[in-house]
Image (tube, rainbow, N blue to C red):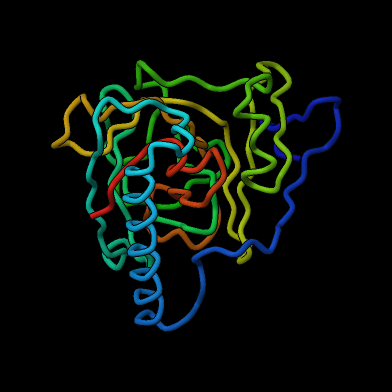
């Protein structure tokens, strides 16, 4: 067991790989990009319709503006066949390339001190200690209790601090393990402080797999911890 991970009740914590359906595959790049574009159009339709449906359950995090717009970029420049978006995390905001995944819910990014392993990424690795608004979430929080539904993996608890530890695993054996945290999210540099809101995400300390040089994953599935559930956005 990794020395920094200790589970409640002195039981071992182990990584289990589940055959989740998500956007990582080894199909020809043109096919991947075509399917991704279809997913984007579907997401765009769902989000716009959701924004016009006043009876829809409100997002977990309140927004200060009616909508925000963030551009999609091909992942070829960062070694991925998936689209990515640049999101600002922390105070002051630091922007990171996040791969879009419509098949998973939990969003996560690599974080210092990278206790076990961080892959090479295009942007500087996020440093939680440099953000005045970052906080770890404890095992007693509702967000930690929601991890099982969001990732199909049970959360663990750090023995000394009771910090919540997540495991996000994927069908190709890629995975991320780290602390569940919360910080200010800024959707776009042009949007200014009006687009800021609190966002729950994983702060990865052991990140292994086919992530290119992205900072992490933006989970766009339907669970309440997903990015779409935490904020109303328009993808352009």
Q: Could you say which quadrant of the image residue 166 lies in?
A: top right
Residue 81 visible in the displayed image: no
- Residue, far left: 190
Quadrant that contains the C terminus: bottom left
Depth check, front residue: 160 or 31: 31
Q: Could you say which quadrant of the image residue 199 lies in?
A: top left
| Residue in the picture at 35% in, 66% down | 79
Q: Position of residue 114 (x, y in %)?
A: 50, 38
Residue 175 visible in the displayed image: yes
Q: Position of residue 214 (x, y in %)?
A: 37, 53
Above or below, comparing residue 10 to residue 57 in the picture: above
Q: Position of residue 46 (x, y in %)?
A: 39, 54
| Residue in the picture at 73% in, 21% down | 159
| Residue in the picture at 38% in, 37% down | 54
Residue 216 falls left or right of residue 150:
left
| Residue in the picture at 35% in, 39% down | 232
Q: Position of residue 85 (x, y in %)?
A: 30, 51
Quadrant that contains the N terminus: top right
Depth check, front residue: 174 or 201: 201
Residue 11 falls left or right of residue 30:
right
């Amino acid at each position: 067991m990794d020395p920094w991970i200790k589970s409640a009740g002195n039981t071992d914590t182990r990584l289990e790989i589940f055959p989740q359906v998500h956007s990582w595959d080894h199909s020809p790049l043109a096919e991947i990009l075509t399917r991704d574009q279809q997913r984007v159009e579907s997401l765009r339709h769902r989000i716009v319709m959701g924004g016009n449906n006043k009876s829809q359950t409100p997002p977990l995090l309140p927004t200060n503006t009616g909508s925000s717009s963030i551009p999609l970029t091909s992942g070829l420049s960062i070694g991925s066949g998936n689209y990515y978006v640049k999101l600002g995390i922390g105070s002051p905001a630091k922007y990171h390339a996040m791969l879009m995944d419509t098949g998973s819910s939990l969003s996560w990014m690599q974080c210092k001190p990278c206790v076990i392993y961080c892959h090479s990424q295009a942007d500087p690795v996020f440093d939680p200690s440099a953000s005045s608004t970052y906080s770890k979430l404890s095992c007693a929080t509702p967000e930690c209790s929601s991890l099982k539904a969001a990732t199909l993996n049970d959360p663990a608890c750090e023995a000394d601090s009771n910090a919540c530890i997540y495991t996000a695993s994927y069908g190709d054996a890629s995975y991320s393990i780290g602390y569940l945290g919360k910080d200010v999210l800024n959707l776009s540099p042009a949007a200014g402080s009006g687009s800021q809101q609190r966002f729950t995400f994983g702060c990865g300390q052991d990140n292994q797999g086919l992530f290119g040089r992205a900072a992490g994953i933006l989970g766009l599935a339907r669970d309440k911890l997903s990015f779409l559930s935490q904020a109303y956005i328009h993808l352009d």
